Amino acid sequence: MRRCRLQISGQSFAPSPVCCEPVLSYPGAYRIRHNDQETAVLVNGRWTEDWQPVQESDQEGRFVRQRSSFRDRIGSEPENRFAAEAGRYQLYVAYICPWASRTLIALRLKRLETAIGVCVVDPRLSDQGWAFTGEFGSDLDHENGARHLHQIYSTADPTYTGRATVPVLWDKREGTIVNNESSDILRIFDQDFGHLASDDIVLRPAALEAQIDACNERLYDDFNNGVYRAGFATTQDAYEEAVAQVFATLDWLEKRLDGASWLVGDQLTESDIRAFVTLIRFELAYQGLFKCNLRPLSSYPAVVAYLHRLMAIPAFAASVRPEHIKAGYYSIKALNPNGIVPVGPTPDYLATAVR
């Protein structure tokens, strides 16, 4: 096999060691071999075979996250290509996924459930990635009749190259993807749906924007993405670096929440959503599977109290499916080849989660 650079969504990767082989059944497609494990992606709109989510890494073994490719917004003006209209859009999500859960929480906080449809993928990864099975609390795709999420991507862009990820905001009228970046979709629901959305809560108030951005940056780099950098690290140094940053952020959160109800100001903001989706999965998945086990979450009493506070809000509690989270993460064969799903843990802050 030959050493190569792989272009995905405009990014060029050359992890070491990485080798690419042609996939003969799919012209123009390549199977990626990374540390003796295979993965596959959409290449020019065609799905390669034997998919497993082995993540890209850099020369030092650090996890590299794929960039989102669809970045349009909803417009309040009727002449906008993607106008704010009830019944026009569908949100594809996975309850396992923290990024998708951000959008679900925002959708419910803004009371958009009747305006935007939701379709849930099976949490158990198939050999073609996310699937619509109608099993395990998931849905069939009645809108497009797709069996796998990658078909939604190739419908939107027949030349798409990259992994098929959730969340996806789909336009039924145009038959295309509006956006697949969770931070964008969160703000679309908060800001772009005008009278269709509740104005009881504003997740990004103008007076707090600078503080929210600073908080979000810390959360993303060292915590939201940090747990993945730990879990998918391919060298000891990269793993230890990531774990140290994860727990430094937990220390920071504990200090910030000591005596405070929310992360920014005196109200719930999008920063709380961003922190929550990683915190709620910490004991269920990241502590065990991703080896983020330097200290137990119980050693952070202010953080645990914060989780209780957020889980008392219906929009947050409704986004949490513990069995989806465990089944999904522990189906990643690259990290858990035997597929055994732990029976626990059962922290008391999950009492209001959907079972």
Image: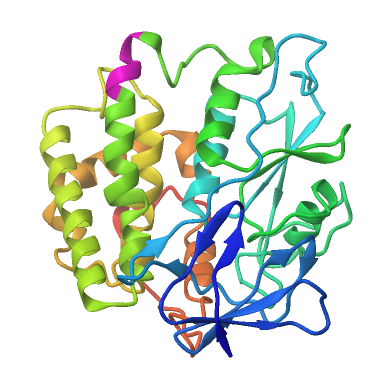
Q: In this rendering, is residue 210 above or below 2? A: above
Residue under the image location 80 percent in, 49 percent down: 157
> Based on the displayed image, in which of its 4 quarters is residue 64 positioned?
bottom left
Residue 32 among those drawn in magenta: no
Q: What segment carries the magenta color? A: 207-211
Q: Percent position (x, y) of residue 33?
A: 55, 83
Q: Main secondary structure of the magenta part?
A: helix
Residue under the image location 74 percent in, 82 percent down: 23
Q: Nearer the viewer, residue 254 or 66?
A: 66
Q: In this rendering, is residue 205 above or below 294? A: above
Going by the image, does 343 lie left or right of 118? left
Residue 208 among those drawn in magenta: yes
Q: Percent position (x, y) of residue 61?
A: 33, 72
Q: Nearer the viewer, residue 31 or 7?
A: 7
| Quarter the N terminus occupies | bottom right
Q: Is residue 284 visible?
A: no
Q: Is residue 195 visible?
A: yes
> Based on the displayed image, in which of its 4 quarters is residue 42 positioned?
bottom right
Going by the image, does 23 lie left or right of 35? right
Residue under the image location 33 percent in, 27 percent down: 213
> Based on the displayed image, in which of its 4 quarters is residue 8 positioned?
bottom right
Q: Percent position (x, y) of residue 119?
A: 72, 48
